[in-house]
Amino acid sequence: MKKVSKWIWGAATLVYAFLYLPLAIVVAFSFNDSNLNAEWVGFTLDWYKLLFHDDVMIEAATHTLAIGAITCLVSTVLGTLAGYAMYKYRLRLLPVLVLTPIAIPEILMGVSLLIFFVMLNMTLGLVSITLSHIAFCIGFVAIVVRSRLQGMDETLVEAARDLGASPVMAFRRITLPLIMPGIIAGALMAFTLSIDDFVISFFTAGVGSNTLPLEIYSRVKVPIKLNPEVNAVSTLLMLLTLSLILIVSKVAPSALRTND
């Protein structure tokens, strides 16, 4: 058992090192006083100062946060309604319609949305990106909300109805407060997925509608343009994402499980 345990711990260490060591290197080199990501020269904050004076990067970050906020709001409302409907009515077709966008590959989702917008003769831009992110994130919110509903004590709603509460009042006074942690968790997840998305944004973005992931990609795909400023913005984006994940884990630690 001890040998097996050592092998398991060794394999787990290698896997986590493979996952997190590159992230640690990005963070470290964002403070490196060198134009090249080759060796450590010294500590500096110049790349962060340069980043906050980069108008193109700031504009891309503004677009990303705006799209993320709108996506978070709309997908949370629609995803909550979808999750409640899936839990309440047990319709066979509804889960397929809600969950298909998150089950298919992102590249297929991006291509299909691009074709859809072209068929509508719609100009690609921030609106098309936002609509695409909403369509993608609704399913995630619905899963989280439905998971929260499955762990709810239904007798509380029945007791409220027995005491004279209408269905709307019972939902507003009983169900909604109980599932609120799940709604918040779903909202934060939708925001995180939106600001991190690259594939769908790549296919649905138009001229002048750059987002932060797209801007980062445009700067690293050409080796000569690779600079520590990209490391700095990647570090900040990573910090924001991890902060949202921590908030989700504190607000609703069991919201992302299939069952409570």
Image (tube, rainbow, N blue to C red):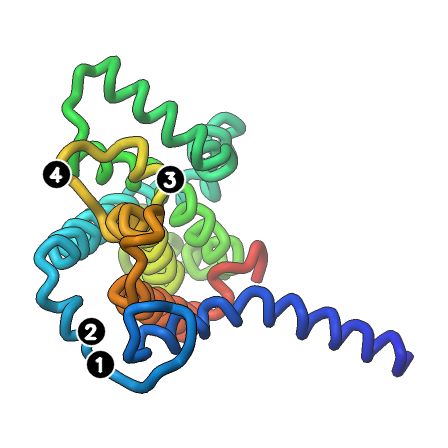
The three-letter amino acid code for the residue at tag 3 is: Val
Q: Earlier in the sequence, mark 4 or mark 1?
A: 1
The answer to whether any part of residue 163 appears in the image is no
The residues bearing labels 2 and 4 have C-alpha atoms spaced at a distance of 24 Å
What residue is shown at x 44% (from left), y 61% (from top)? 156
The reply to whether dot 2 and dot 1 touch (C-beta < 8 Å) is: yes
Q: Earlier in the sequence, mark 3 or mark 1?
A: 1
**Which type of secondary structure does the marked residue at label 1 adopt?**
loop
Query: Could you tell whether 184 is left or right of 109 in the image?
Result: left
The residues bearing labels 2 and 1 have C-alpha atoms spaced at a distance of 6 Å
Disc 2 or disc 4, which is closer to the eye?
2
**Which type of secondary structure does the marked residue at label 3 adopt?**
helix
Q: Which mark is residue 208?
A: 4
The residues bearing labels 3 and 4 have C-alpha atoms spaced at a distance of 17 Å
The reply to whether dot 4 and dot 1 touch (C-beta < 8 Å) is: no
Residue labelled with disc 3: 199
The three-letter amino acid code for the residue at tag 4 is: Gly
Q: Position of residue 196 (x, y in %)?
A: 34, 53
Q: Which mark is residue 48?
A: 2
Name the foreground residue: 123 vs 252.
123
- Image quadrant occupied by the N terminus: bottom right
Name the foreground residue: 43 vs 205.
43
Q: Which mark is residue 45?
A: 1
The reply to whether dot 2 and dot 4 touch (C-beta < 8 Å) is: no
Specify few, some or many for label 4: CA neighbours under 10 Å numbering under 14, 14-19, or 20 or more: few
The reply to whether dot 3 and dot 4 touch (C-beta < 8 Å) is: no
